[in-house]
Amino acid sequence: MLKLLRGFTLKNSSEKELSKSLKNVLGFTPGNISLYKQAFLHSSKRETVNNERLEFLGDAVLGAVVAEYVFKLYPYKDEGFLTQLRSKVVNRQSLQQLAIKFGIDKYLKTGIKETEKGKSSAYGDAFEALIGAIYLDKGFPACKKFIVQRIIKLHLNLDELANTDSDYKSQLQIYTQKNKLSLEYRLLSEEQRGRDKIYTVQVFINNEPYVKFEHYSKRSAEQKAAQLTLEQLSIIP
């Protein structure tokens, strides 16, 4: 199913060929092909138009569809469980893997060096932008159907994800202790936003800075920073 898409390059193919290739993956013929071309144009190309706005929209749509799906799938689970499961589906590493499965890595237009692409979020960003393009082109019902039928049911095992250890701080602590490294979560700032505070936390291993993350909850900021650090260290897939 993905062979046509994987062999496709935007530079040497017409819009008609792009539309034909996308049909094999999406299950429908794109209407406004310019939306899909934009979805695969990364900001590093420094063009006037890129995929950042579509990425923003796709992130929101994907999160909403996944939230509804897990809400109905696990009717007796609490908010914490549902939040963690949703985050496992839409986290950076998961989106990167999905993007590669869908062949986006083969034809994304980006200014990032080939050797650096795997370390960037470019593939995952483009995948979210694709969701945004589908939403604008076909509407929410069709976009929801694509996410459920073509992503969740074909490529994700939610029960397996639900049983995966998500205490990332503990995992990172085990790693650092095993390797005799120091671990610290530094609170970089507390910013008042309305009635709430935004906490920015950064991971330091042996006094070397790693990922930083901000959240309304200091504990959640630490957990997410730990998760992204584990991903950066290739300790979790």
Image (cartoon, helix red, strand yellow):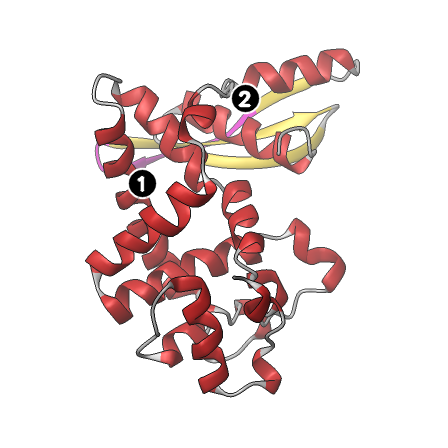
Q: Horizontal placement of 27 versus 227: left or right?
A: left
Compared with 100, 78 (above or below) is: above
Magenta region, mostly helix, strand or loop?
strand
Judge whether residue 190 is colored magenta: yes
Q: Horizontal placement of 204 versus 189: left or right?
A: right
Answer yes or no: is residue 108 visible: no
Q: Tell me which segment is drawn in magenta.
A: 186-195
What amino acid type should be assigned to the residue bearing mark 1? Val
Answer yes or no: is residue 155 visible: yes
* Residue at position x 49%, y 56% in the image: 125
Tell me the residue that label 2 is attached to. 168
Q: Judge depth for marks 2 and 1 and give the one in front.
A: 1
Q: Quarter-wise, where is residue 58 in the image? A: bottom left
- In percent of width and height, residue 164 lies at 50, 21
What amino acid type should be assigned to the residue bearing mark 2? Tyr
Q: Nearer the viewer, residue 77 or 28?
A: 28
